[in-house]
Amino acid sequence: MSLDGGNLLGCYTELEIAAGIPALVDGRDRGYLNDEDESIGTFDAELTNTVKQLTHPYDLDKRAVLSQEIAELNSSADTKSVTIRRLVADNLDYAIFRFGKKEEIPDRHLNLAKDQNIIQSMIKGLLSKSLNIDLTTEIVDEVDSFVRRLQRNEELETPYLRTSEIQRYVHEKAKLALGVGGHKALNRAHMRVLLSLSRAHLSIGDLERPLTSIIEDESVELKSNSSVPNNYFGHLFNKSILQAQLEDQYPGAKKTINGEYKKKWNVRFMKPFSYYCDEQTRSKIERILAVEEGTDLFTLKESCINIYSRRM
């Protein structure tokens, strides 16, 4: 094989080419220590700084981020919930992965949980394919409006309760189309994936929302209610925990989507999405929740920052 001219790349595998080996060999890669780029002294200084960052007991970047986010907060409840939201957000990809494993959702479907239109698309698919409902403009607009209302969540309901509303909506459409018992015509596998992805999608949306909701240029203020903290995520997080605790105390069995009866079957569905985070994140959340409410705000903020940024 000739090594001349344009045939030079024939010496390398595709992986070596992708890694930039040819450029290194013929001198076209400037490299980390190219004299025209930076001096060895500068490189050593940056390396030393990186080592210090990695060996520090706290992640300094995380400390800076959270410190800024909670600086203006004036309540313990808001400080805790913002810290927990940051922990879950940092671990979101793993939580979605673990959710998929527990729900037995194929990866190709699980990746759609972040899609803004996934719920509408799956509902329309069920109506069309399982119930032979003609997707007129009126039906499409109705489905879109229904889902947007759930995403805005002005009623401050948990993802579990909104997912239950989706199930009732589809069952009602089946009844109107096919009569009593029409829901039995629904594709069971499709329905199960719809409900699971809806719960994940709504949970992710709740996590990413600020104190006011902005959807398609509509700003929706939280309802005025003295019992609701001025923190959307914190309210739903606490509400989900309470619902799961109450369900856990229910002595009877509940009917599953497969028609079986199981005790406490709904409990894990009611828990906040943090339930699916990794063990380290869940441990940190428990420690934040355990910080006594009577702690002065400055000390509580320092505790939250330390827990959040601590390397484990």
Image (cartoon, grey):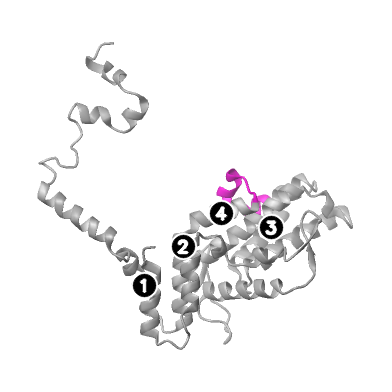
What amino acid is found at the position of numbered circle 2 in the picture?
Gln
Residue at the outermost top position: 1
**Mark 2 crowd level (few <14, some 14–19, many ≥20, 10 Å Cα):** few
In the image, 36 versus 132, the foreground residue is 36
Q: CA distance from mark 1 to mark 4?
A: 26 Å
Q: Is residue 167 visible to us here? A: yes
> Which mark, by number, is residue 98?
4
Disc nearer the start of the sequence (1/4): 4
Q: Quadrant of residue 225?
A: bottom right
Camera-near label (3 vs 2) is 2
Q: Which residues are magenta?
A: 104-122
What percent of the width, then of the height, locates residue 274? 54, 64
Disc nearer the start of the sequence (3/1): 3
Q: CA distance from mark 1 to mark 2?
A: 14 Å
Q: Secondary structure at mark 1?
A: helix
What amino acid is found at the position of numbered circle 1 in the picture?
Asn
**Mark 4 crowd level (few <14, some 14–19, many ≥20, 10 Å Cα):** some
Q: CA distance from mark 3 to mark 2?
A: 39 Å
What amino acid is found at the position of numbered circle 4 in the picture?
Arg
> Which mark, by number, is residue 306?
1
Residue 89 lies in magenta, yes or no? no
What residue sits right under mark 3 in the picture? 143
- Name the residue rendered at 57%, 53% in the picture: 113
- Name the residue rendered at 73%, 47% in the picture: 189
> Which mark, by number, is residue 18?
none
**Mark 3 crowd level (few <14, some 14–19, many ≥20, 10 Å Cα):** some
Camera-near label (3 vs 4) is 4
What residue sits right under mark 2 in the picture? 280
What amino acid is found at the position of numbered circle 3 in the picture?
Val
- Name the residue rendered at 19%, 42% in the picture: 32
Disc nearer the start of the sequence (4/2): 4
